[in-house]
Amino acid sequence: MEIAITGIGAISAIGNDVNGNLRSLVAKETGIGKAEWLDSKLTGTHLFGEVKLTNAQLKEGLNWKGDAVSRTTLLSVWAMKEAIERSGIVIDDQVGLVSSTSVGGMDRSEGFFEPYYTAQDFANVFMLGTHDCGTCTKQAAAHFGITAYATTISTACSSAANAVAMGARLIRQGKLKRVIVGGTDALCRFTANGFNSLMILDTEWCKPFSANRAGLNLGEAAAYLVLESREDAEARGAEIHGLVTGWANTNDAYHQTASSPDGNGAFMAMTQALEKAGLNPSDISYINAHGTGTQNNDQSESIAIHRVFGAQKPPISSTKAYTGHTLAAAGAIEAVYSVLALKENRLFPNLNYQDPIVENDWKPQLEVQDADIKHVLSNSFGFGGNNSTLIFSKA
Amino acid sequence: MYLGAASCISFQDTFGNENPWNSLVGIHDGTQLVQPDYKQFVSPAALRRMSSALKMGVAGGKSSLERAGIENCDAISVGTGLGCVRDTLKFLAAVYKDGEGGLSPTAFIQSTHNSIAGQLALMLGNHGYNMTHVQGALSLGYALSDAELLIGEGDAETVLVGAVDEKTDELVELLSKLSETGNYKLPVVGEGGAFFLASKEKLSSSVAKVIELNLTSRTNVGSESQIPSFGGVGGGLVLSNTDEGFNYTQFSGEHFTSVGFGLFMALKAFEAEKVDNDHITFSDPTRILVHHKLLGQEMSILLEKV
C-alpha cells in the first residue's frame, strides 16, 4: 500500500503557513534573529528562530477561547488547521493524530516556575495544568474532534520523523484511514538554557556543514502532514503532494547526547529507510540533512552520508539556518520542505556556508536550483541516540 | 501479540517475586519504592547520576530480557506520563536560582523523556527501533499499540515495552497544589517501572495474548464510562483503578502509568493460578481485563492466558 500526503501545514520562523515558508526558502531569507517574545536572559547574547506571531495573535487567528493553553499547543493547532484544510478531509472516527513535542507546555509552565523558584510563590500553579506533553496533543485532538487515536512521541529531535513513520504504519495496517502526523515545540527558557549548558549554541547564525561551524540556533515551529492510502486519496479526488515511501528508526547506542564518530546510527537509519522504500542510494535526488551546525552532528552525519552514498552524492542541504533547530518539530518542518522540493522541483540551499569540511568530498547545495526531484531523503537525529530517516517520493 | 517476562519495580515486593499477589501490603503517602539492588544492572559510577526513573528503566528493562532468556530485543517502546521529573525540576531550579548562568548540563541531558529508552539502548547495545510515548494515562497503551504496529509490519518480532514514572517530594507538593486549583482530590501519588516482552510468536516466556487494546480520551473529564466488555471477560478477573474491578492502585499508588503495575499483576495472576488472601481470591483465571482511568483518559487491555 502506498502512503499519500494529502495535506501539509507549517508555521516557523520563516513563515506562518506553507506558502510563507516556501517564499522565504526561495528568497534565501532566514527567520533567525533577535528574539522578541522569548523571556530569557539568553536573548541578549544569542539568536533564535522565533515564530513572528504572539500568543495573542495565534489565539485570535484560531478563534481560541480561554487561557489554559501553551504556545506549543497554539503552534500545533495552527499548523494542523492548515494541513487539515488543505487536505479537505472530514474528521471522523477513522482519523488519528500522532503528534510530537520535546517539552510540551513548558513555555506556559515557566510562568509558574519563575515566581515559584525565585520567591516560593505558588500563585500560578494552575499553569502546570498544561505542562505535560500529552496535554498538548489532547487539546489539539479535542479542538478538531479527533477521538480515535491521539498520541505524543517524544524522542527529542527525531520525534516528528518518528510520528510520520508511525502514521504510515497505522494506515498500512488498516488501523486508521487517515492520520495527521507532525510535531510542535515552542521556544522556552528551559530548552534555551539546556542547549546553552551543553555549549552547542552558536551566538551568530549557525553554519551547517561549514568547517568553522560553532553550534546550532534554536527555533520554534509546528508542522503537520495528512497521510492516507493512495487508493483512498484518489477515490476522494484529493491532491496528492507526494508519497511517504521509506522510514527507519534506529539507535546509535553510543552516547546519551553525542553521535558516534562513525555515524553508525545514522548509517543504519538511511540504509534501512532506503530498503523500506525499495530504492538504491542513486535514486535519491536530494538529501535534506539534519545538519544542525554542531561540530559533532555535522561530522558524524557527513561520515554516515559518505558511507551510504559513496562518491555519488545527490545535492545535500540543511535548512536549519533558515528556521533554527526546532527540536521535536524539526522532522515535520523538514518533511514539509522535502514535499515542497518534490512539488516545486527545486533544491533549497544551505545558508551561511563558509569553509569546506576537509574530510568531505562535497559541498552543500548553496543556491536555489531547479532540478528533477523524484525522491527526497530527510534525516532527523536526537539525544538518546535516536536516528530516524524518512524518504518522500513523487506520486 | 504475546506478553510475558514481566518485571516490575513498585511500592510492593514485585521485583523478581514469583507470586507478588501473596505479599501485597497497604500503602500511604510515605510509602517508598521497594528497589532492587541496582548494582546488578548498572555500574556504581553510572548509578550515582541516575534518577529513579532511569534506574527503574534500566533495571526493569534488563531484567525483563533476562526473564525472557534473550540477549537483546528488536525494538524498545516506552510509555511515560511525565518522564524524568526529578531532572527536569532540578534543571529548572538551577535556571532560576543561578540566573541562567553557569549551568551543568547533566540534569538537562537526563531530563528528556526519551532518556529512559535511550539509556536502555545504550546499556543493551541495542540499535533497533527506539520509541517513547508521552500521552498521560494512555502512555503505556500507546507504547503497546506501537509495539503491535511494529510487529504487524514485520519490522520486529520482539519488543521490550515499558511504563515508567517517578515521583519526588516536590512533584507531590506541586500536584497537591494543582489539585486544589482543579478542585479534585489527589490520590496517593505512586511511582514505578514495569517492563514486558511483547512478541509476535508465543515464546517460552509468554504468559498472555493481547485480545484487545482500547484507548480513549474524553475532553469532558470525569464523564462516566463503562468498561468495554469485549464480549465479556467470562468469569475472568477485572483489575481496575475504579470500583468496577479489583483496585490495584491501592497497592501501587496512582500515576500516569500505574496501569503498568496492573498489567504486571495480571500476568502474575495467570502464572500464580490460585490466590486466596485477605485482599483477593481467584482461581486459574483464563481472561483478565486490566483497566485504568485517569483525568479523562482510559485504557483497557483484555488478556488471555496462553
Image (cartoon, coloured by chain):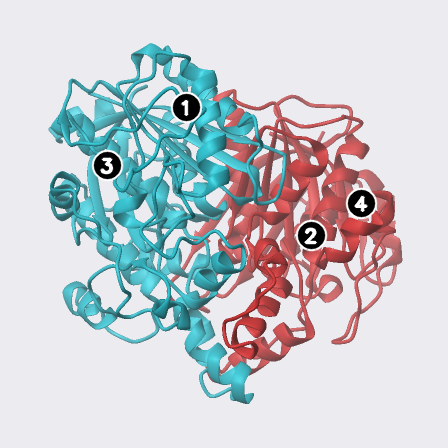
Chain colours: A cyan, B red
Residue bearing mark 3 = A337
- From mark 3 to mark 2, how far is it between C-alphas? 36 Å
Residue type for callout 3: Tyr
Query: Residue B23, image x and y in percent?
Result: 88, 57
Q: What's under tag 2, amino acid-wise? A: Leu
Rendered image: mark on residue B54: 2
Q: Given contact means CB atoms under 8 Å apart, are the residues at marks 3 and 4 in contact?
A: no
The chain letter under disc 4 is B
The residue under the point 35% across, 44% down is A330
Mark toward the viewer: 1 or 4: 1
Q: Amino acid at mark 1?
A: Asn
Crowding near the residue tagged with mark 3, few <14, some 14–19, many ≥20 C-alpha atoms within 10 Å: many
Q: Earlier in the sequence, mark 3 or mark 1?
A: 3
* Dot 2 crowding, Cα within 10 Å, few <14, some 14–19, many 20+: many
**Which structural element holds mark 4?**
loop
Mark 4 → mark 2, Cα distance in angstroms: 10 Å
Does the CB distance between marks 3 and 1 fall below 8 Å? no
Q: How far across and how far down the image is residue A284, in percent?
A: 30, 17
Same chain for the residues under marks 2 and 1 in the image = no
C-alpha span from label 3 to label 4: 42 Å
The answer to whether dots 3 and 1 both sit on one chain is yes
Which label is found at residue B42? 4
